[in-house]
Image (cartoon, helix red, strand yellow):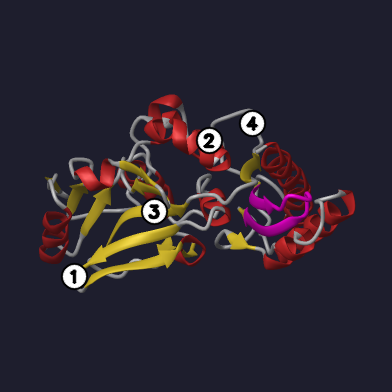
C-alpha cells in the first residue's frame, strides 16, 4: 500500500529543508491539479508539501514599482484585489477562468504555472504583463521570465529541490492595458482550445509604442509571439495592424490535432483571438 506524508511548514526555508530531505515531495499550492493526478495514479509523491501556511507565498504585495503575487495566493483573492483589477485586468480575467468558484478558493497561479499545461489560463496574461517567476532553492534565489518557465507539457524550469515562491509584475506604464481571452468547447469549466493575452502601451498621439502578445494551447508551451507584437508597434492598432498581428500569431502556432479541435482549426482560432484581444487591450489603454 502506498503511504504518503503530509507536511505544512511555515517558512520557505522549512519547505526547502523538507524538499532536500524528501526528494519525492510534491508541492501543494492548492492541490486542485495534484490531488486529481494522485487519485488517478499519475503521481505518487512521498510527501505532500502544503505551502499555504507560508505567509510570503500567500501574500499579494503592491508597491510603487509593481506587484508581487505569492505562488500559493488563492485565485479568488487575486480576482478580488482592487489594485490588480485596475493594473492587470487581463491577468484577472485569466485567473478568474481557472476552474470553478470552489476551485478558485484553493487554486493558485503558482500551481497553474507549475502544472505545466500549455493551456493554463493565467500564463498568457502573465507573459504579456512581463511577469517574472521568483524561485528559491538550495543554492539561493533566482528569477526566470514566465515565458521561459514552462519547458513542455508537465515540465518547468524548476530544478530538483527548487520552489516557486512568487511572481513579480512591473507596474504598467501610462496608457498601458492588457486583456485575455480563450475559446473553449463549453460555456465554462473547460480547457482552452486556444488562448491569447496581450499588453499594449500607447503614447499621447495614440500610437502603440510597446506590445506583448502571448498565445496558449497551440504549442507545447505558451508562446511569446514577437512578430505579432511588431505588427502592432508604431501603429494606432488599426484593422490592418490587427490583421497582421493575427496572421503572425497563426503562423507562430504549431498545435496538435485532438478531440477538442484540429491543428488547422486552432491556428485559425488563435489568430481570431489575437485580433480580438489586441483590440480590447487597445481600447482599455486609450481610456487611461
**Residue at x 68% of width, y 56% of height:** 257
Disc 3 versus disc 4: nearer the observer: 3
Q: Which of marks 4 and 2 is nearer the N terminus?
A: 2
Please give the count of numbered marks on the rendered protein: 4
Disc 3 versus disc 1: nearer the observer: 3
Q: Earlier in the sequence, mark 1 or mark 2?
A: 2
Disc sitting over residue 86 in the figure: 2
Q: Are marks 4 and 2 in contact (CB under 8 Å)?
A: no
211 left or right, relative to 40: right
Q: Which of marks 4 and 1 is nearer the N terminus?
A: 1
Disc sitting over residue 186 in the figure: 4
Q: Main secondary structure of the magenta part?
A: strand
Q: Earlier in the sequence, mark 3 or mark 1?
A: 1
Disc 4 versus disc 2: distance between alpha carbons? 29 Å
Disc 1 versus disc 2: distance between alpha carbons? 36 Å
Magenta stretch bounds: 195-215
**Residue at x 53% of width, y 42% of height:** 88
| Residue 226: x %, y % from top left | 68, 67
Count residues near mark 1 (Cα–Cα under 10 Å), then give few for <14, some for 14-19, many for 20+.
some
Q: What element carries label 2?
A: helix
Disc 4 versus disc 1: distance between alpha carbons? 43 Å
Q: Do the residues labelled 3 and 1 touch (CB within 8 Å)?
A: no
| Residue 111: x %, y % from top left | 37, 48
**Residue at x 68% of width, y 64% of height:** 254
Q: Is mark 1 on a helix, strand or loop?
A: loop
> Vertical placement of 128 versus 60: above or below?
below
Residue receiving disc 1: 138
Disc sitting over residue 167 in the figure: 3
Q: Is mark 4 on a helix, strand or loop?
A: loop
Q: Are marks 3 and 4 in contact (CB under 8 Å)?
A: no
105 left or right, relative to 48: right
Q: What element carries label 3?
A: strand
Amino acid at each position: 500500500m502506498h503511504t504518503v506524508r503530509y507536511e505544512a511548514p511555515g517558512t520557505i526555508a522549512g519547505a526547502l529543508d523538507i524538499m532536500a530531505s524528501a526528494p519525492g515531495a510534491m508541492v501543494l499550492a492548492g492541490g486542485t491539479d495534484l490531488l486529481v493526478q494522485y487519485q488517478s495514479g499519475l503521481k505518487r509523491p512521498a510527501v505532500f508539501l502544503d505551502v499555504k501556511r507560508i505567509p510570503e507565498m500567500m501574500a499579494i504585495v503592491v508597491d510603487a514599482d509593481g506587484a508581487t503575487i505569492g505562488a500559493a495566493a488563492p485565485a479568488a483573492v487575486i480576482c478580488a484585489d482592487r489594485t490588480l483589477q485596475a493594473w492587470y485586468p487581463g491577468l484577472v480575467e485569466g485567473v478568474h477562468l481557472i476552474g470553478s468558484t470552489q476551485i478558485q478558493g484553493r487554486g493558485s497561479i503558482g500551481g497553474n504555472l507549475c502544472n505545466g499545461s500549455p493551456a493554463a489560463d493565467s500564463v498568457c496574461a502573465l507573459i504579456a504583463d512581463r511577469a517574472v517567476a521568483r524561485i528559491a532553492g538550495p543554492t539561493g534565489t533566482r528569477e526566470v521570465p514566465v515565458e521561459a518557465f514552462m519547458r513542455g507539457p508537465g515540465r518547468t524550469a524548476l530544478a530538483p529541490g527548487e520552489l516557486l515562491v512568487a511572481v513579480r509584475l512591473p507596474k504598467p506604464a501610462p496608457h498601458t492595458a492588457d486583456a485575455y481571452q480563450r475559446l473553449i468547447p463549453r460555456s465554462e469549466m473547460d480547457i482552452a482550445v486556444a488562448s491569447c493575452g496581450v499588453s499594449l502601451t500607447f503614447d499621447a498621439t495614440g500610437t502603440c509604442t510597446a506590445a506583448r502578445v502571448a498565445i496558449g494551447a497551440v504549442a507545447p508551451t505558451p508562446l511569446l509571439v514577437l512578430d505579432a507584437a511588431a505588427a502592432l508597434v508604431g501603429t494606432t492598432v488599426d484593422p490592418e495592424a490587427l490583421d497582421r498581428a493575427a496572421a503572425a500569431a497563426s503562423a507562430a502556432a504549431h498545435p496538435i490535432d485532438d478531440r477538442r479541435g484540429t491543428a488547422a482549426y486552432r491556428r485559425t482560432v488563435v489568430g481570431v483571438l489575437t485580433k480580438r484581444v489586441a483590440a480590447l487591450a487597445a481600447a482599455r489603454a486609450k481610456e487611461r
